[in-house]
Each structure stands twice: as structure tokens, then as C-alpha cells.
């Protein structure tokens, strides 16, 4: 299943930084909060949230354009993304062949199964062995590579190309990443900002963290997001 994992990793890299932001948003714990406290005084002000959000959005944009805006003009075109994705797919197909094509003839079939008492045909990833017959033909390889490219292109342009003109501008990536980072900050504020002033103080954090497991957590009576008196 390593190839399958590599495939997933390839898609994940396409939106790597975005995925990271999502992972972090799932756990707005003290660790996540400290990142926002620029002057380290225990309180995260609205200005600190805004500054960190802007920095994160810029980082996310940079990581996307570093990989995909190959001519460095600030816009990711369909052709730029396609070239990158085709290279990724070619590498992925090559890795598959390296693993399974023992006799190096460019396809995988019974002649690649080592002979010997305990020799067994390896299970081939469905992604390549589309018809499940235990062999991967040149047509199947080609189809798998093309499917991967199509998925990567679809994924990218569905996420970022808001006006569907086939190019991803800095404004488009900024809008997507800003929405995601703001979602995370909103979640943090919902959890910790008990007095709803846009800042999270050490006392507000302590009220949530010390209340955990004692009925005063987020959404509980007396806890942030819970019923008020
Ligand atoms: Ca470009
Ligand atoms: Ca072979
Ligand atoms: Ca566009
Ligand atoms: Ca507050």
C-alpha cells in the first residue's frame, strides 16, 4: 500500500500547508494559542491574531506558489500546474514500476513474480491494476498517470480558481487561505474568548483548560460557548 500512500501524499502536498492549517484548527489547545502571542505576555490581542493570520496566509501562499508558479509571475496557470502534476504522476508511475516491475520491461505481470517455493504474486495497488487481474498493462499505467494528473488539477483548481478562468491569482489564493485561517481563529475565540472582546487572556485560557473534565469546558454551563447566567 506504499504506492497508495505516496499517491495520497502527492495530493496532500498539493495543498500541504492548507491541510496543516486544518489539522491545527482541530485542536485549539495551549500549544496552538502560544503561536499567536507574539509578545509572549499571556494575552493574545485582536492585533496579534490579525498579524499572525496575515503571516500564516502569506506562508501558505508562498508554499503553494513555490511549487506551482514556476515562472514566478504571481499567477499559477493551468499549464504551469499541469507540468508540475505530470512530473509528479511520472515520478509516481516510476516508483510503482521500480517496486513491481522486476524484469524491467515496463509492465507488471506474472513474469515479474519471483520463482521459488514461497513466491507469491504481490497485491498490486487498485490505482494501477484497474481490472484487478494481477497484472498492470501499459494502458493501465498510462490511465493511472492520467487519472492522477486529472485529480491533482481538479483538486487545485476547484479549491483556488474562484472565477474559473484557468489561472490562480494571488488574490484567489489569499481569499481561500484567509477564510481558512480566520475559521481557525474564530474557533479559538469561540473556545476561549469568554467575554467576547476579541482578545484571549491568560485567565480566559485558564478558565477553559482548568475546567476541562470538570464540567466547565467549552459549550458547558459556565464555560465558553455554554449557557450564560
Ligand atoms: Ca506563473
Ligand atoms: Ca515486467
Ligand atoms: Ca482565476
Ligand atoms: Ca477576552
Image (cartoon, grey):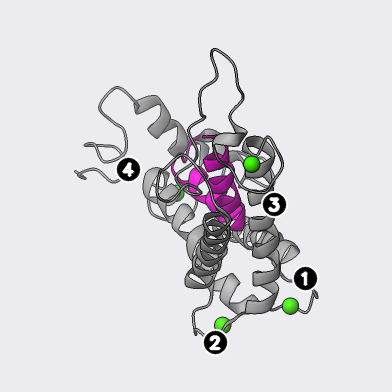
Q: Which residue is the site of mark 4? A: 224
Residues at marks 4 and 1, CA–CA distance in whole angstroms: 46 Å
In magenta segment, residue 59: no
Relative to 166, residue 135 above or below: above
Q: What residue is at 46 percent from the left and 36 percent from the top? A: 205
Q: Secondary structure at mark 1?
A: loop
Could you tell me which residue is drawn at 68 percent across and 56 percent down? 90
Q: Kindly report the distance in space between the C-alpha atoms of the residues bearing marks 4 and 3.
A: 49 Å
Residue sitting at the far top = 117
Q: Residue at (57%, 83%) from the top-left corner?
A: 166
**Mark 3 = which residue?**
91
Q: Nearer the viewer, residue 3 or 180?
A: 3
Q: Is residue 227 left or right of residue 86?
A: left
Q: Residues within 10 Å of mark 4 (few under 14, many from 20)?
A: many
Magenta: main secondary structure: helix
Chain-order first, disc 4 or disc 1 = 1
Q: Quadrant of residue 66?
A: bottom right
Q: Indicate whether residue 14 is drawn in magenta.
A: yes
The span picked out in magenta is 1-29
Q: Is mark 1 within 8 Å of ligand 1?
A: yes
User: Marks 2 and 3: CB-CB under 8 Å?
Assistant: no
Residue at label 2? 165
Identify the element where label 3 is drawn: helix
**Residue 105 location, x and y as percent?**
69, 46
Residue 203, given in percent of the width and then of the height, sits at 47, 35
Q: Nearer the viewer, residue 11 or 220?
A: 11
| Numbered mark located on residue 119 in the image | none
Instruction: Say if residue 61 shows up in the picture.
Output: no
Amino acid at each position: 500500500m506504499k504506492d497508495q500512500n505516496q499517491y495520497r501524499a502527492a495530493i496532500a502536498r498539493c495543498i500541504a500547508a492548507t491541510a496543516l492549517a486544518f489539522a491545527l484548527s482541530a485542536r485549539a489547545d495551549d500549544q496552538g494559542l502560544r503561536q499567536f502571542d507574539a509578545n509572549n505576555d499571556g494575552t493574545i490581542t485582536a492585533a496579534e491574531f490579525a498579524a499572525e493570520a496575515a503571516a500564516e496566509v502569506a506562508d501558505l501562499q508562498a508554499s503553494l506558489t513555490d511549487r506551482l508558479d514556476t515562472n514566478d509571475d504571481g499567477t499559477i496557470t493551468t499549464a504551469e500546474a499541469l507540468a508540475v502534476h505530470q512530473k509528479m504522476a511520472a515520478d509516481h508511475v516510476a516508483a510503482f514500476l521500480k517496486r513491481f516491475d522486476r524484469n524491467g520491461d515496463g509492465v507488471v505481470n506474472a513474469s515479474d513474480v519471483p520463482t521459488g517455493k514461497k513466491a507469491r504474486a504481490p497485491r498490486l495497488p487498485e490505482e494501477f491494476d484497474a481490472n484487478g487481474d494481477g497484472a498492470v498493462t501499459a494502458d493501465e499505467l498510462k490511465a493511472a498517470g492520467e487519472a492522477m494528473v486529472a485529480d491533482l488539477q481538479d483538486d487545485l483548481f476547484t479549491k483556488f480558481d474562484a472565477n474559473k478562468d484557468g489561472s490562480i491569482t494571488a488574490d484567489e489564493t489569499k481569499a481561500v487561505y484567509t477564510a481558512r485561517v480566520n475559521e481557525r481563529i474564530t474557533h479559538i475565540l469561540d473556545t476561549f474568548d469568554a467575554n467576547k472582546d476579541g482578545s484571549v487572556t491568560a485567565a480566559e485560557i485558564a478558565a477553559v483548560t482548568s475546567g476541562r473534565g470538570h464540567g466547565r469546558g467549552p459549550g458547558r454551563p459556565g464555560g465558553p460557548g455554554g449557557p450564560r447566567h
